Image (tube, rainbow, N blue to C red):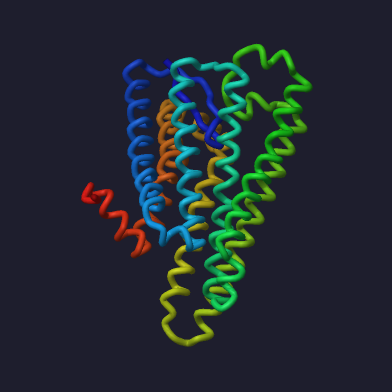
Amino acid sequence: MNSLSVQNGSSYVRYPDSFSTAIAKNVTVVLLGISINYLNGTLIHTFRKHQVFYHNPRYILFIHLVVNDTVQLTTAVTLFVCTYVFYTINTYLCCFILSFVVFTSLNSPLNLAVMAVECYIAVCFPLQHPQLCNIKKIYIVIGCIWAMNLLSFLPDIFFLAATEPALFSSTVVCETTHLFRNPIMIKKREVTYSVYFVGVWLVLTYTYVQIFLAARSVKTTNSDAKKARNTILLHSFQLLLSMLTYVFSTVLQLVFILFPRIHLHFIFVWYILLQILPRFLSPMVYGLRDNMFREHLKKYLSCSAT
């Protein structure tokens, strides 16, 4: 059997694992994936069943993040299991799966940035909030997020098809770093990720500072501003977890040199911490912190809904 290392939700390296260890790891990953997706599915069902959420841009952005996390988690778990079972898969299928991996990976930081801006407008410009953050504009922004990521990844597939057409008639290890090895594509990917994450950090920092200054200017306890600041801090924590996946290779090399006997276990723990558990953060932070959403959610979690 094989042990897997994961980078950016899709990068795998082959290492030997005993049969029992491989089964234990796969069962753990699958059970965690099913549990988190069940909770995410309950959040989506709660959103669908109550019209009150349809008219609030904050809930629309939140549920888009949950759907994005669900797709990302499902894809990551599928690749984890497939790499143990098949190791290599058809190139066309790999490109299809990696498309969802890349889209959802890039969607998350952009969605966090939009949520931070919505909080900033709600606190600092409450009178303009209905016009600036109406439902139509929120859906347009979500569409732009998907369009940007689509345009950033499709050229890689077209470039690969033009330069290595024979690759599409074979099977490959389904990972971005293994499939897209051209220096031009590597450089483009590095620049894209850098621009995305630097831009999101600037947005989060600016909105947090402005909300903090707005809360101080009223010289009273502003619960909305405090909650908005805490939300942006949680956005920053989520973004930090996303960025840690991009230093995986460097950390793995250090662990392999310093602790060669435990590097297999480190790979698996890293995968759980940075690919599985962060998907659990969104429903816990946003679904349970919001009073109205929590009250509706309790009915479905307790199976008491009629």
Relative to 220, 195 lies left or right? right
Instruction: Residue at 39%, 46% (x, y): give it.
Output: 280
Instruction: Residue at 48%, 63% (x, y): give it.
Output: 56
Number of numbered discs overlaid on the protein picture: 0
Vertical position of residue 161 compared to residue 100: above or below: above
Quarter holding residue 158: top right
Question: Which residue lies most toward the bottom here?
Answer: 219
Vertical position of residue 279 compared to residue 140: above or below: above
Vertical position of residue 209 compared to residue 296: above or below: below
99, 243: nearer the viewer = 99
Image quarter (top left, top right, bottom left or bottom right) of the N terminus: top left
Q: Position of residue 92 (x, y in %)?
A: 62, 20
Quarter holding residue 165: top right
189, 56: nearer the viewer = 56
Vertical position of residue 38 compared to residue 123: above or below: above
Instruction: Residue at 47%, 25% (x, y): give it.
Output: 4
Q: Position of residue 10 (x, y in %)?
A: 54, 31
87, 124: nearer the viewer = 124
Q: Position of residue 76 (x, y in %)?
A: 48, 32
Relative to 42, 140 lies left or right? right
Q: Position of residue 59 (x, y in %)?
A: 46, 58
Instruction: Residue at 62%, 49% (x, y): give it.
Output: 143
